[in-house]
Amino acid sequence: INAQGEDVVAGIRTPQELTRAARLVHASELPSLEEAMPVIFAELSTVRRRLEEHYTDMQDIEFTIQQGKLYMLQTRTGKRTAPAALRVAVEMAKEGLISKEEAVMRLKPENLDQLLHPMLDPAAKKSVIAKGLPASPGAASGRVVFDADEAERLGKDGESVLLVRVETSPEDIHGIHAAKGILTTRYGPALRLGAGAVRVDYAAKALYVGDVVVKAGEMLTIDGGAGEVILGEVPTVPPQLSGDFGTIMGWADEFRRLGVRANAETPADARAAREFGAEGIGLARTEHMFFDSDRIVVMREMILALDEAGRRDACAKLLEMQRSDLIELFEIMDGRPVTVRLLDPPLHEFIPHTEQELASVLAEANPMLGHRGCRLAVTYPEICEMQARAVFEAAAEVGARAASGRPPIAEVMVPLVATVREIEILKQVIENTAQRVQQERGVKLTYRVGTMIELPRAALQAGQIASTTEFFSFGTNDLTQTTWGLSRDDAGGFLPEYKEKGLVDSDPFVSLDQDGVGELIRIAAERGRAARPGLKLGICGEHGGDPASIDFCERVGLDYVSCSPFRVPIARLSAA
Protein backbone atom coordinates (compact mmCIF):
# COMPACT_ATOMS: atom_id res chain seq x y z
CA ILE A 1 0.00 0.00 0.00
CA ASN A 2 1.24 3.49 -0.93
CA ALA A 3 3.97 1.98 -3.10
CA GLN A 4 4.76 1.12 -6.71
CA GLY A 5 5.73 -2.26 -8.08
CA GLU A 6 9.27 -1.05 -8.61
CA ASP A 7 9.54 -0.38 -4.89
CA VAL A 8 8.84 -4.03 -4.11
CA VAL A 9 11.24 -5.29 -6.80
CA ALA A 10 13.97 -2.99 -5.50
CA GLY A 11 13.37 -4.20 -1.96
CA ILE A 12 12.43 -0.73 -0.70
CA ARG A 13 8.98 -1.82 0.53
CA THR A 14 7.73 -5.08 2.02
CA PRO A 15 4.84 -6.62 0.04
CA GLN A 16 1.60 -7.29 1.95
CA GLU A 17 -0.60 -10.38 1.68
CA LEU A 18 -3.85 -10.39 -0.28
CA THR A 19 -5.87 -12.38 2.27
CA ARG A 20 -6.14 -12.40 6.03
CA ALA A 21 -5.53 -16.17 6.05
CA ALA A 22 -2.22 -15.76 4.23
CA ARG A 23 -1.18 -12.98 6.62
CA LEU A 24 -1.78 -15.25 9.60
CA VAL A 25 0.12 -18.13 8.03
CA HIS A 26 3.14 -15.91 7.40
CA ALA A 27 2.81 -14.12 10.76
CA SER A 28 2.84 -10.71 9.12
CA GLU A 29 1.92 -7.66 11.17
CA LEU A 30 1.02 -5.65 8.05
CA PRO A 31 -2.71 -5.65 7.15
CA SER A 32 -3.78 -7.71 4.14
CA LEU A 33 -5.67 -6.21 1.19
CA GLU A 34 -8.75 -8.06 2.37
CA GLU A 35 -8.55 -6.25 5.71
CA ALA A 36 -7.33 -2.85 4.54
CA MET A 37 -9.63 -2.49 1.50
CA PRO A 38 -12.46 -5.04 1.76
CA VAL A 39 -14.54 -3.52 -1.07
CA ILE A 40 -11.61 -3.44 -3.50
CA PHE A 41 -10.65 -6.97 -2.44
CA ALA A 42 -14.16 -8.25 -3.19
CA GLU A 43 -14.08 -6.59 -6.63
CA LEU A 44 -10.64 -8.09 -7.35
CA SER A 45 -11.89 -11.55 -6.34
CA THR A 46 -14.84 -11.20 -8.73
CA VAL A 47 -12.59 -10.18 -11.63
CA ARG A 48 -10.14 -12.97 -10.82
CA ARG A 49 -12.90 -15.57 -10.90
CA ARG A 50 -14.26 -14.16 -14.18
CA LEU A 51 -10.83 -14.30 -15.83
CA GLU A 52 -10.23 -17.85 -14.61
CA GLU A 53 -13.62 -19.00 -15.90
CA HIS A 54 -13.05 -17.29 -19.25
CA TYR A 55 -9.56 -18.68 -19.86
CA THR A 56 -10.29 -21.96 -17.99
CA ASP A 57 -6.85 -21.85 -16.46
CA MET A 58 -5.01 -20.38 -13.51
CA GLN A 59 -4.14 -16.72 -14.21
CA ASP A 60 -1.21 -14.50 -13.30
CA ILE A 61 -2.84 -11.07 -13.04
CA GLU A 62 -1.43 -7.59 -12.55
CA PHE A 63 -3.45 -4.74 -11.10
CA THR A 64 -3.08 -1.41 -9.38
CA ILE A 65 -5.29 0.57 -7.03
CA GLN A 66 -5.37 4.34 -7.32
CA GLN A 67 -7.59 6.71 -5.36
CA GLY A 68 -9.90 3.88 -4.33
CA LYS A 69 -10.36 2.49 -7.86
CA LEU A 70 -9.18 -0.92 -9.10
CA TYR A 71 -7.39 -1.02 -12.47
CA MET A 72 -6.59 -4.34 -14.18
CA LEU A 73 -3.31 -4.10 -16.09
CA GLN A 74 -2.83 -7.54 -17.68
CA THR A 75 -3.47 -11.27 -17.32
CA ARG A 76 -1.66 -14.33 -18.60
CA THR A 77 -1.61 -18.05 -17.91
CA GLY A 78 0.30 -18.55 -14.71
CA LYS A 79 3.45 -20.62 -14.46
CA ARG A 80 3.37 -23.40 -11.89
CA THR A 81 5.33 -26.26 -10.37
CA ALA A 82 4.31 -29.86 -10.97
CA PRO A 83 2.50 -30.14 -7.59
CA ALA A 84 0.63 -26.90 -8.32
CA ALA A 85 -0.24 -28.04 -11.87
CA LEU A 86 -1.64 -31.27 -10.45
CA ARG A 87 -3.80 -29.47 -7.87
CA VAL A 88 -5.04 -26.83 -10.33
CA ALA A 89 -6.01 -29.42 -12.95
CA VAL A 90 -7.91 -31.62 -10.49
CA GLU A 91 -9.71 -28.74 -8.76
CA MET A 92 -10.76 -27.13 -12.05
CA ALA A 93 -12.13 -30.43 -13.29
CA LYS A 94 -14.08 -30.93 -10.07
CA GLU A 95 -15.46 -27.39 -10.37
CA GLY A 96 -16.60 -28.11 -13.92
CA LEU A 97 -14.36 -25.51 -15.55
CA ILE A 98 -12.57 -28.17 -17.61
CA SER A 99 -13.24 -31.82 -18.44
CA LYS A 100 -11.38 -34.74 -16.93
CA GLU A 101 -9.76 -35.29 -20.34
CA GLU A 102 -8.47 -31.72 -20.36
CA ALA A 103 -7.21 -32.09 -16.79
CA VAL A 104 -5.17 -35.14 -17.79
CA MET A 105 -3.78 -33.34 -20.85
CA ARG A 106 -2.76 -30.33 -18.74
CA LEU A 107 -0.30 -32.39 -16.71
CA LYS A 108 2.97 -33.01 -18.59
CA PRO A 109 4.20 -36.58 -18.00
CA GLU A 110 7.85 -35.52 -17.83
CA ASN A 111 7.04 -33.21 -14.91
CA LEU A 112 5.80 -36.10 -12.79
CA ASP A 113 9.40 -36.76 -11.75
CA GLN A 114 8.98 -33.79 -9.41
CA LEU A 115 6.22 -35.73 -7.68
CA LEU A 116 7.94 -39.12 -7.51
CA HIS A 117 11.63 -38.45 -6.71
CA PRO A 118 13.72 -36.00 -4.73
CA MET A 119 14.66 -33.26 -7.19
CA LEU A 120 17.28 -30.54 -7.01
CA ASP A 121 15.94 -27.30 -5.60
CA PRO A 122 15.49 -25.10 -8.70
CA ALA A 123 16.46 -22.03 -6.66
CA ALA A 124 19.76 -23.53 -5.51
CA LYS A 125 23.06 -22.56 -7.10
CA LYS A 126 25.04 -25.39 -8.66
CA SER A 127 28.43 -25.91 -10.23
CA VAL A 128 28.10 -28.49 -13.00
CA ILE A 129 31.44 -30.13 -13.80
CA ALA A 130 30.30 -32.87 -16.22
CA LYS A 131 27.31 -34.06 -18.19
CA GLY A 132 26.61 -37.65 -19.10
CA LEU A 133 23.81 -39.97 -20.12
CA PRO A 134 20.85 -39.82 -17.71
CA ALA A 135 20.21 -43.30 -16.35
CA SER A 136 17.29 -42.72 -13.97
CA PRO A 137 15.20 -39.88 -12.58
CA GLY A 138 15.89 -38.18 -9.27
CA ALA A 139 18.88 -36.56 -7.63
CA ALA A 140 21.24 -37.48 -4.81
CA SER A 141 24.13 -36.01 -2.84
CA GLY A 142 26.74 -37.80 -0.80
CA ARG A 143 30.36 -38.27 0.10
CA VAL A 144 32.37 -39.81 -2.71
CA VAL A 145 33.58 -43.38 -2.22
CA PHE A 146 35.31 -45.60 -4.76
CA ASP A 147 34.87 -48.95 -3.08
CA ALA A 148 31.65 -50.93 -2.57
CA ASP A 149 32.78 -52.22 0.85
CA GLU A 150 33.42 -48.65 1.99
CA ALA A 151 30.02 -47.56 0.68
CA GLU A 152 28.35 -50.34 2.65
CA ARG A 153 30.28 -49.53 5.84
CA LEU A 154 29.53 -45.81 5.72
CA GLY A 155 25.93 -46.47 4.72
CA LYS A 156 25.42 -48.60 7.82
CA ASP A 157 26.78 -45.70 9.88
CA GLY A 158 24.08 -43.45 8.45
CA GLU A 159 26.37 -41.61 6.04
CA SER A 160 25.03 -40.50 2.64
CA VAL A 161 27.47 -41.75 0.02
CA LEU A 162 27.86 -41.71 -3.75
CA LEU A 163 29.56 -44.78 -5.16
CA VAL A 164 31.89 -43.86 -8.04
CA ARG A 165 33.07 -46.65 -10.34
CA VAL A 166 34.43 -47.01 -13.85
CA GLU A 167 31.70 -49.61 -14.26
CA THR A 168 29.67 -51.68 -11.85
CA SER A 169 29.80 -55.47 -11.49
CA PRO A 170 28.11 -58.11 -9.32
CA GLU A 171 30.83 -57.56 -6.70
CA ASP A 172 29.49 -54.02 -6.18
CA ILE A 173 25.89 -54.99 -5.45
CA HIS A 174 26.14 -54.46 -1.66
CA GLY A 175 27.64 -51.01 -2.20
CA ILE A 176 25.00 -50.15 -4.78
CA HIS A 177 22.28 -50.96 -2.26
CA ALA A 178 23.95 -48.80 0.39
CA ALA A 179 24.68 -45.75 -1.79
CA LYS A 180 22.31 -42.86 -2.38
CA GLY A 181 23.45 -42.76 -6.00
CA ILE A 182 25.93 -44.30 -8.40
CA LEU A 183 28.19 -42.50 -10.84
CA THR A 184 29.98 -44.57 -13.48
CA THR A 185 32.10 -43.67 -16.46
CA ARG A 186 30.33 -46.55 -18.21
CA TYR A 187 26.91 -48.07 -17.76
CA GLY A 188 26.45 -50.91 -15.28
CA PRO A 189 23.60 -53.07 -13.97
CA ALA A 190 22.12 -50.64 -11.45
CA LEU A 191 23.04 -46.99 -11.53
CA ARG A 192 21.90 -43.42 -11.57
CA LEU A 193 24.21 -41.76 -14.03
CA GLY A 194 26.79 -42.69 -16.64
CA ALA A 195 29.22 -39.85 -17.34
CA GLY A 196 31.91 -40.57 -19.88
CA ALA A 197 33.74 -37.26 -19.30
CA VAL A 198 34.74 -38.35 -15.79
CA ARG A 199 38.06 -40.17 -15.27
CA VAL A 200 38.40 -42.36 -12.19
CA ASP A 201 41.70 -43.26 -10.50
CA TYR A 202 41.14 -45.97 -7.89
CA ALA A 203 44.73 -45.83 -6.61
CA ALA A 204 44.56 -42.09 -5.95
CA LYS A 205 40.94 -42.37 -4.75
CA ALA A 206 39.99 -39.43 -6.94
CA LEU A 207 37.94 -38.55 -10.00
CA TYR A 208 39.03 -36.00 -12.57
CA VAL A 209 37.07 -33.76 -14.93
CA GLY A 210 39.53 -31.54 -16.75
CA ASP A 211 41.31 -29.54 -14.04
CA VAL A 212 38.74 -30.39 -11.38
CA VAL A 213 39.70 -33.07 -8.85
CA VAL A 214 37.22 -34.65 -6.43
CA LYS A 215 38.76 -36.85 -3.74
CA ALA A 216 37.23 -39.56 -1.59
CA GLY A 217 35.13 -38.10 1.22
CA GLU A 218 34.27 -34.88 -0.61
CA MET A 219 30.65 -34.03 -1.36
CA LEU A 220 29.23 -34.50 -4.84
CA THR A 221 25.72 -34.29 -6.29
CA ILE A 222 24.30 -36.10 -9.32
CA ASP A 223 21.10 -35.33 -11.18
CA GLY A 224 20.03 -38.58 -12.80
CA GLY A 225 17.33 -36.95 -14.91
CA ALA A 226 19.48 -34.15 -16.34
CA GLY A 227 22.67 -36.20 -16.48
CA GLU A 228 24.65 -33.65 -14.47
CA VAL A 229 27.57 -34.10 -12.07
CA ILE A 230 27.71 -31.21 -9.61
CA LEU A 231 30.31 -30.12 -7.08
CA GLY A 232 29.28 -30.07 -3.43
CA GLU A 233 25.91 -30.74 -1.87
CA VAL A 234 22.88 -29.23 -3.62
CA PRO A 235 19.61 -29.04 -1.65
CA THR A 236 16.82 -31.30 -2.87
CA VAL A 237 13.05 -30.97 -2.77
CA PRO A 238 11.26 -34.08 -1.45
CA PRO A 239 8.58 -35.78 -3.60
CA GLN A 240 5.05 -34.56 -2.98
CA LEU A 241 2.24 -37.07 -3.46
CA SER A 242 -1.33 -36.30 -2.50
CA GLY A 243 -4.92 -37.38 -3.05
CA ASP A 244 -4.94 -35.34 -6.26
CA PHE A 245 -2.21 -37.63 -7.62
CA GLY A 246 -4.45 -40.69 -7.24
CA THR A 247 -7.35 -38.79 -8.79
CA ILE A 248 -5.49 -37.75 -11.95
CA MET A 249 -4.00 -41.26 -12.35
CA GLY A 250 -7.49 -42.76 -12.11
CA TRP A 251 -8.72 -40.40 -14.82
CA ALA A 252 -5.72 -41.23 -17.02
CA ASP A 253 -6.51 -44.94 -16.71
CA GLU A 254 -10.03 -44.29 -17.98
CA PHE A 255 -8.71 -42.83 -21.23
CA ARG A 256 -5.72 -45.04 -22.08
CA ARG A 257 -5.68 -48.22 -24.15
CA LEU A 258 -2.02 -49.12 -23.68
CA GLY A 259 -1.22 -51.35 -20.71
CA VAL A 260 1.56 -50.40 -18.29
CA ARG A 261 3.77 -52.92 -16.55
CA ALA A 262 7.01 -52.60 -14.58
CA ASN A 263 10.55 -53.94 -14.84
CA ALA A 264 11.08 -55.55 -11.43
CA GLU A 265 12.80 -58.59 -9.97
CA THR A 266 12.97 -57.70 -6.26
CA PRO A 267 10.03 -57.67 -3.84
CA ALA A 268 10.70 -54.00 -3.04
CA ASP A 269 10.50 -53.00 -6.71
CA ALA A 270 7.44 -55.18 -7.29
CA ARG A 271 5.60 -53.59 -4.36
CA ALA A 272 6.55 -50.10 -5.53
CA ALA A 273 5.28 -51.01 -9.00
CA ARG A 274 1.92 -52.10 -7.62
CA GLU A 275 1.62 -48.94 -5.51
CA PHE A 276 2.20 -46.87 -8.64
CA GLY A 277 -0.45 -48.80 -10.57
CA ALA A 278 1.52 -51.33 -12.64
CA GLU A 279 -0.65 -53.99 -14.25
CA GLY A 280 2.01 -56.68 -14.04
CA ILE A 281 5.71 -57.25 -14.47
CA GLY A 282 6.91 -56.88 -18.05
CA LEU A 283 10.51 -57.82 -17.32
CA ALA A 284 11.98 -59.78 -14.41
CA ARG A 285 15.72 -60.06 -15.09
CA THR A 286 16.60 -63.40 -13.49
CA GLU A 287 20.34 -62.75 -13.49
CA HIS A 288 19.81 -59.92 -11.00
CA MET A 289 18.50 -62.52 -8.53
CA PHE A 290 21.97 -64.11 -8.36
CA PHE A 291 24.11 -61.06 -7.57
CA ASP A 292 23.88 -61.25 -3.76
CA SER A 293 27.04 -62.57 -2.13
CA ASP A 294 25.50 -65.82 -0.85
CA ARG A 295 24.12 -66.67 -4.30
CA ILE A 296 26.85 -65.62 -6.67
CA VAL A 297 29.12 -68.35 -5.29
CA VAL A 298 26.65 -71.00 -6.44
CA MET A 299 26.29 -69.22 -9.77
CA ARG A 300 30.04 -69.43 -10.25
CA GLU A 301 29.94 -73.09 -9.32
CA MET A 302 27.52 -73.66 -12.19
CA ILE A 303 29.54 -71.56 -14.65
CA LEU A 304 32.83 -73.30 -13.92
CA ALA A 305 31.41 -76.83 -13.81
CA LEU A 306 33.37 -79.18 -16.07
CA ASP A 307 30.40 -81.22 -17.25
CA GLU A 308 26.62 -81.41 -17.35
CA ALA A 309 26.46 -83.34 -14.08
CA GLY A 310 28.33 -80.56 -12.29
CA ARG A 311 26.09 -77.91 -13.82
CA ARG A 312 22.98 -79.82 -12.80
CA ASP A 313 24.21 -80.07 -9.20
CA ALA A 314 24.69 -76.29 -9.10
CA CYS A 315 21.38 -75.72 -10.89
CA ALA A 316 19.59 -77.70 -8.18
CA LYS A 317 20.85 -75.19 -5.60
CA LEU A 318 19.98 -72.22 -7.81
CA LEU A 319 16.50 -73.65 -8.36
CA GLU A 320 15.55 -73.17 -4.72
CA MET A 321 16.79 -69.57 -4.74
CA GLN A 322 15.07 -68.67 -7.99
CA ARG A 323 11.80 -70.34 -6.98
CA SER A 324 11.63 -68.49 -3.65
CA ASP A 325 12.16 -65.13 -5.39
CA LEU A 326 9.50 -65.86 -8.01
CA ILE A 327 7.02 -66.96 -5.36
CA GLU A 328 7.26 -63.48 -3.84
CA LEU A 329 6.80 -61.78 -7.21
CA PHE A 330 3.74 -63.88 -8.07
CA GLU A 331 2.23 -63.20 -4.64
CA ILE A 332 2.77 -59.44 -4.92
CA MET A 333 1.34 -59.30 -8.45
CA ASP A 334 -1.76 -61.26 -7.31
CA GLY A 335 -2.88 -62.79 -10.59
CA ARG A 336 -1.33 -60.18 -12.85
CA PRO A 337 1.14 -61.33 -15.53
CA VAL A 338 4.79 -61.76 -14.60
CA THR A 339 7.24 -61.95 -17.51
CA VAL A 340 10.38 -63.84 -16.48
CA ARG A 341 13.36 -63.44 -18.80
CA LEU A 342 15.75 -66.36 -18.91
CA LEU A 343 19.40 -65.76 -18.10
CA ASP A 344 20.74 -63.12 -20.49
CA PRO A 345 24.21 -61.63 -19.77
CA PRO A 346 27.54 -63.24 -20.69
CA LEU A 347 28.63 -65.64 -17.95
CA HIS A 348 31.99 -63.89 -17.44
CA GLU A 349 30.10 -61.03 -15.74
CA PHE A 350 29.59 -63.30 -12.72
CA ILE A 351 33.32 -63.94 -12.33
CA PRO A 352 35.36 -61.57 -10.09
CA HIS A 353 37.39 -59.08 -12.10
CA THR A 354 40.35 -59.75 -9.84
CA GLU A 355 40.43 -63.45 -10.70
CA GLN A 356 41.80 -63.03 -14.19
CA GLU A 357 42.71 -66.69 -14.60
CA LEU A 358 39.05 -67.63 -14.08
CA ALA A 359 37.65 -64.81 -16.16
CA SER A 360 39.93 -65.75 -19.03
CA VAL A 361 38.23 -69.14 -19.30
CA LEU A 362 35.08 -67.34 -20.38
CA ALA A 363 36.72 -64.40 -22.14
CA GLU A 364 35.25 -63.24 -25.46
CA ALA A 365 36.36 -60.46 -27.80
CA ASN A 366 32.84 -59.00 -27.84
CA PRO A 367 30.82 -60.68 -25.07
CA MET A 368 27.66 -58.63 -25.59
CA LEU A 369 27.38 -60.23 -29.03
CA GLY A 370 28.78 -63.54 -27.88
CA HIS A 371 27.73 -66.51 -25.75
CA ARG A 372 24.72 -65.04 -23.97
CA GLY A 373 20.92 -65.02 -24.00
CA CYS A 374 19.25 -67.94 -25.75
CA ARG A 375 22.68 -69.14 -26.91
CA LEU A 376 23.47 -70.12 -23.32
CA ALA A 377 20.23 -72.07 -23.07
CA VAL A 378 20.80 -73.82 -26.41
CA THR A 379 24.29 -74.98 -25.42
CA TYR A 380 23.35 -75.66 -21.78
CA PRO A 381 19.64 -76.67 -21.83
CA GLU A 382 19.84 -77.72 -18.19
CA ILE A 383 20.00 -74.00 -17.29
CA CYS A 384 16.82 -73.30 -19.25
CA GLU A 385 15.17 -76.34 -17.68
CA MET A 386 16.09 -75.19 -14.16
CA GLN A 387 14.75 -71.69 -14.74
CA ALA A 388 11.53 -72.93 -16.32
CA ARG A 389 11.00 -75.31 -13.40
CA ALA A 390 11.53 -72.45 -10.94
CA VAL A 391 8.88 -70.38 -12.76
CA PHE A 392 6.31 -73.16 -12.92
CA GLU A 393 6.84 -74.50 -9.42
CA ALA A 394 6.54 -70.99 -8.01
CA ALA A 395 3.34 -70.40 -10.01
CA ALA A 396 1.91 -73.75 -8.86
CA GLU A 397 2.68 -73.04 -5.20
CA VAL A 398 1.20 -69.54 -5.24
CA GLY A 399 -1.82 -70.66 -7.26
CA ALA A 400 -2.60 -73.41 -4.75
CA ARG A 401 -2.97 -70.91 -1.92
CA ALA A 402 -4.09 -67.76 -3.76
CA ALA A 403 -6.57 -66.10 -1.42
CA SER A 404 -7.94 -63.89 -4.20
CA GLY A 405 -8.75 -66.85 -6.40
CA ARG A 406 -6.68 -65.28 -9.20
CA PRO A 407 -4.04 -67.78 -10.36
CA PRO A 408 -0.60 -66.50 -11.36
CA ILE A 409 0.04 -65.77 -15.02
CA ALA A 410 3.58 -66.83 -15.89
CA GLU A 411 5.23 -65.57 -19.07
CA VAL A 412 8.59 -67.17 -19.90
CA MET A 413 10.66 -64.94 -22.18
CA VAL A 414 13.60 -66.20 -24.24
CA PRO A 415 16.19 -63.44 -24.87
CA LEU A 416 18.39 -62.59 -27.86
CA VAL A 417 16.65 -64.86 -30.35
CA ALA A 418 17.86 -64.52 -33.96
CA THR A 419 16.31 -67.59 -35.60
CA VAL A 420 13.02 -69.43 -35.31
CA ARG A 421 14.89 -72.68 -34.66
CA GLU A 422 16.36 -71.28 -31.44
CA ILE A 423 12.94 -70.54 -30.02
CA GLU A 424 11.58 -73.90 -31.23
CA ILE A 425 14.32 -75.81 -29.38
CA LEU A 426 13.93 -73.86 -26.15
CA LYS A 427 10.14 -73.76 -26.23
CA GLN A 428 10.23 -77.57 -26.30
CA VAL A 429 12.40 -77.59 -23.16
CA ILE A 430 10.05 -75.10 -21.46
CA GLU A 431 6.87 -76.94 -22.51
CA ASN A 432 8.23 -80.30 -21.36
CA THR A 433 9.16 -78.80 -18.00
CA ALA A 434 5.71 -77.24 -17.64
CA GLN A 435 4.06 -80.59 -18.35
CA ARG A 436 6.19 -82.36 -15.74
CA VAL A 437 5.46 -79.75 -13.06
CA GLN A 438 1.73 -79.87 -13.79
CA GLN A 439 1.75 -83.67 -13.48
CA GLU A 440 3.82 -83.60 -10.28
CA ARG A 441 1.67 -80.92 -8.65
CA GLY A 442 -1.68 -81.98 -10.10
CA VAL A 443 -2.42 -78.45 -11.30
CA LYS A 444 -3.25 -76.62 -14.52
CA LEU A 445 -0.97 -73.62 -15.02
CA THR A 446 -1.66 -70.44 -16.96
CA TYR A 447 1.49 -69.61 -18.87
CA ARG A 448 2.84 -68.25 -22.15
CA VAL A 449 6.16 -68.59 -23.95
CA GLY A 450 7.51 -65.61 -25.86
CA THR A 451 10.71 -63.88 -26.88
CA MET A 452 12.55 -60.60 -26.71
CA ILE A 453 13.04 -58.94 -30.06
CA GLU A 454 16.38 -57.21 -29.62
CA LEU A 455 18.23 -58.06 -32.83
CA PRO A 456 17.47 -56.57 -36.29
CA ARG A 457 17.39 -60.09 -37.74
CA ALA A 458 14.71 -61.13 -35.27
CA ALA A 459 12.62 -58.09 -36.21
CA LEU A 460 12.88 -58.94 -39.91
CA GLN A 461 12.11 -62.63 -39.25
CA ALA A 462 9.22 -61.81 -36.92
CA GLY A 463 6.69 -63.64 -39.09
CA GLN A 464 8.53 -66.93 -38.72
CA ILE A 465 9.32 -66.41 -35.04
CA ALA A 466 5.70 -65.55 -34.26
CA SER A 467 4.59 -68.93 -35.56
CA THR A 468 5.96 -70.56 -32.41
CA THR A 469 5.67 -67.81 -29.77
CA GLU A 470 2.76 -66.19 -27.97
CA PHE A 471 4.22 -62.76 -27.31
CA PHE A 472 6.98 -60.39 -28.37
CA SER A 473 8.65 -57.97 -25.99
CA PHE A 474 10.90 -55.48 -27.73
CA GLY A 475 14.16 -55.13 -25.79
CA THR A 476 14.83 -51.62 -27.04
CA ASN A 477 18.10 -51.17 -25.13
CA ASP A 478 19.88 -53.92 -27.07
CA LEU A 479 17.83 -53.31 -30.22
CA THR A 480 19.15 -49.74 -30.22
CA GLN A 481 22.72 -50.95 -29.73
CA THR A 482 22.55 -53.54 -32.50
CA THR A 483 20.73 -51.24 -34.92
CA TRP A 484 23.06 -48.29 -34.43
CA GLY A 485 26.21 -50.37 -33.98
CA LEU A 486 26.61 -48.32 -30.82
CA SER A 487 27.80 -49.43 -27.40
CA ARG A 488 25.66 -48.04 -24.63
CA ASP A 489 28.66 -48.37 -22.31
CA ASP A 490 30.79 -46.03 -24.43
CA ALA A 491 28.24 -43.67 -25.98
CA GLY A 492 28.54 -41.13 -23.16
CA GLY A 493 31.90 -40.05 -24.51
CA PHE A 494 30.50 -38.55 -27.70
CA LEU A 495 26.68 -38.53 -27.74
CA PRO A 496 26.44 -35.16 -25.95
CA GLU A 497 28.56 -33.62 -28.72
CA TYR A 498 26.44 -35.34 -31.36
CA LYS A 499 23.41 -33.67 -29.84
CA GLU A 500 25.11 -30.27 -29.72
CA LYS A 501 26.08 -30.55 -33.40
CA GLY A 502 22.62 -31.67 -34.43
CA LEU A 503 23.63 -35.14 -35.59
CA VAL A 504 20.94 -36.64 -33.34
CA ASP A 505 17.83 -34.96 -31.95
CA SER A 506 17.98 -36.90 -28.71
CA ASP A 507 19.91 -39.67 -27.02
CA PRO A 508 18.63 -42.89 -28.70
CA PHE A 509 19.01 -44.74 -25.39
CA VAL A 510 16.66 -42.28 -23.66
CA SER A 511 14.06 -41.59 -26.37
CA LEU A 512 13.35 -44.21 -29.03
CA ASP A 513 14.87 -43.66 -32.48
CA GLN A 514 11.55 -43.84 -34.30
CA ASP A 515 13.02 -43.67 -37.82
CA GLY A 516 15.46 -46.54 -37.39
CA VAL A 517 14.73 -48.71 -34.35
CA GLY A 518 11.08 -47.72 -34.54
CA GLU A 519 10.85 -48.89 -38.14
CA LEU A 520 12.14 -52.32 -37.12
CA ILE A 521 9.52 -52.47 -34.36
CA ARG A 522 6.82 -51.51 -36.86
CA ILE A 523 7.96 -54.21 -39.31
CA ALA A 524 8.12 -56.85 -36.58
CA ALA A 525 4.67 -55.93 -35.28
CA GLU A 526 3.11 -56.14 -38.73
CA ARG A 527 4.81 -59.40 -39.72
CA GLY A 528 4.30 -60.99 -36.33
CA ARG A 529 0.58 -60.29 -36.22
CA ALA A 530 0.15 -61.31 -39.85
CA ALA A 531 1.51 -64.73 -38.90
CA ARG A 532 -0.29 -64.91 -35.52
CA PRO A 533 -3.33 -62.64 -35.15
CA GLY A 534 -3.66 -61.47 -31.56
CA LEU A 535 0.06 -61.75 -30.86
CA LYS A 536 0.72 -59.79 -27.67
CA LEU A 537 3.30 -57.02 -28.16
CA GLY A 538 5.12 -54.84 -25.67
CA ILE A 539 8.43 -53.11 -24.98
CA CYS A 540 10.57 -53.52 -21.88
CA GLY A 541 13.59 -51.27 -22.47
CA GLU A 542 14.23 -47.95 -20.73
CA HIS A 543 12.13 -46.34 -23.47
CA GLY A 544 9.01 -47.76 -21.79
CA GLY A 545 8.96 -44.75 -19.45
CA ASP A 546 9.69 -42.07 -22.06
CA PRO A 547 6.60 -40.07 -23.17
CA ALA A 548 7.65 -39.69 -26.82
CA SER A 549 8.46 -43.40 -27.07
CA ILE A 550 5.14 -44.32 -25.46
CA ASP A 551 3.32 -42.21 -28.04
CA PHE A 552 5.09 -44.20 -30.76
CA CYS A 553 4.06 -47.50 -29.11
CA GLU A 554 0.45 -46.36 -29.13
CA ARG A 555 0.60 -45.47 -32.83
CA VAL A 556 2.18 -48.82 -33.74
CA GLY A 557 -0.49 -50.67 -31.78
CA LEU A 558 1.58 -52.34 -29.05
CA ASP A 559 -0.37 -53.81 -26.13
CA TYR A 560 1.78 -52.56 -23.26
CA VAL A 561 4.94 -50.81 -22.18
CA SER A 562 7.13 -51.86 -19.25
CA CYS A 563 9.39 -49.47 -17.36
CA SER A 564 11.06 -48.96 -13.99
CA PRO A 565 8.58 -48.81 -11.07
CA PHE A 566 9.00 -45.08 -10.50
CA ARG A 567 8.21 -44.35 -14.15
CA VAL A 568 4.92 -46.26 -14.09
CA PRO A 569 2.84 -43.11 -13.35
CA ILE A 570 4.63 -41.28 -16.18
CA ALA A 571 3.78 -44.14 -18.53
CA ARG A 572 0.14 -44.23 -17.38
CA LEU A 573 -0.26 -40.51 -17.99
CA SER A 574 1.59 -40.61 -21.32
CA ALA A 575 -0.54 -43.49 -22.56
CA ALA A 576 -3.70 -41.46 -21.92
Image (cartoon, rainbow, N blue to C red):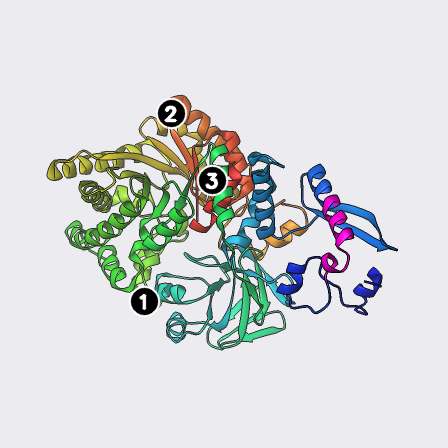
The CA span between labels 2 and 1 is 49 Å
x 44%, y 30%: residue:
460
Q: Main secondary structure of the magenta part?
A: helix
Tell me the amino acid under the disc marked 3. Answer: Gly
Is 257 above or below relative to 268? above
> Can residue 353 be spotted in the picture?
no
Q: Which residues are magenta?
A: 32-47
Q: Quadrant of residue 292?
A: bottom left
x 14%, y 37%: residue:
436
**Left or right of 321: which side holds 477?**
right
- The residue at which mark 3 appears reads as 250
Question: Of marks 3 and 1, which one's residue comes earlier in the chain?
Answer: 3
Q: Position of residue 324 (x, y in %)?
A: 22, 52
Mark 1 crowdedness (10 Å alpha carbons): few <14, some 14-19, many ≥20: few
Q: Which mark is residue 534?
A: 2
Question: Of marks 2 and 3, which one's residue comes earlier in the chain?
Answer: 3
The CA span between labels 3 and 1 is 52 Å
Is 86 above or below relative to 518? below
Tell me the amino acid under the disc marked 1. Answer: Glu
Identify the secondary structure beneath mark 2.
loop
- The residue at which mark 1 appears reads as 355
Tell me the amino acid under the disc marked 2. Answer: Gly
Which image quadrant: the N terminus? bottom right
Q: Does the magenta segment cover residue 147?
A: no
Identify the secondary structure beneath mark 3.
helix
x 17%, y 49%: residue:
308
Mark 2 or mark 1, which is nearer to you?
Answer: 2
Question: Of marks 2 and 1, which one's residue comes earlier in the chain?
Answer: 1
- Do the residues under discs 2 and 3 have CB atoms within 8 angstroms? no
Q: Position of residue 300 (x, y in %)?
A: 25, 59
